[in-house]
Amino acid sequence: MIWNLLGIGIKTASEIYKNKKETQRLESVAKLQHYQKMASGEIEYQAKVIDNQNQGWKDEVVLAIVILPIIVIAYSVFSGTPDAKEKLDLFFEYFNNLPDWYVWLTVGIFGSIYGLKPTADLFRKK
């Protein structure tokens, strides 16, 4: 009976090891095919983009610096009177009066940090 259990245990361990090695092989093949597609231009170099986005805190610092004027405007508007509608209108009036270069800088930084690709048509003033 012990020999039967030992045989079953060895067989199971062998099967698990074999499955693990097969999984590693398949992952390697999938990675190779992915890099071949990137090299041939079928897909973009997404792995490099993901690696670059996970490299640090500099994006968060830049984002905080860029949105600081928006936070100050929001605080100055919302800390005054209790009428929310008028405050919201005033906030967007102030925001609309920001220089175009600042608005485009903000849009560009948000797009860069979060991987957005804004088009000029969406942000043109009417």
Image: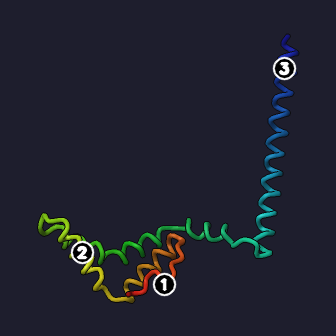
Left or right: where 5 falls relative to 50: right
Q: Amino acid at mark 3?
A: Leu
Spatial separation of the CA atoms under disc 1 and disc 3 = 71 Å
Residue 30 located left or right of residue 49: right
Q: Residue at x 84, y 34 (%)?
A: 15
Label 3 vs label 2, nearer the camera: 2
> x and y percent of residue 96 in the render?
30, 82
Looking at the rendered structure, which numbered label has been put on residue 2?
none
Residue found at x 41% / y 73%? 63
**Mark 1 belongs to which amino acid?**
Asp
The residue wearing badge 2 is: 91
Kindly identify the residue that appears in the image at 30 percent across and 75 percent down.
70
Disc 3 crowd rating (10 Å Cα; few below 14, some 14-19, many 20+) is few
Task: Name the colouring of the figure.
Answer: rainbow
Front disc: 1 or 3: 1
Cα distance in 3D space between marks 2 and 1: 24 Å
The residue wearing badge 3 is: 6
Q: Is residue 80 above or below residue 103?
A: above
Q: Which residue is mark 1?
A: 121
Q: Quadrant of the C terminus?
A: bottom left
- Please indicate whether residue 112 sits to the left or right of residue 3 in the image: left
Quick one: SS at disc 2? helix
18 lies above or below 31: above
Q: Position of residue 62 (x, y in %)?
A: 42, 75
Neighbours of disc 2 within 10 Å: few (<14), some (14-19), many (20+): some
Residue 111 x %, y %: 49, 75
Looking at the image, the residue that sits furthest to the left is 81
Earlier along the polypeptide chain: callout 3 or callout 2? 3
Q: Is residue 17 above or below residue 46?
A: above
Amino acid type, mark 2: Phe
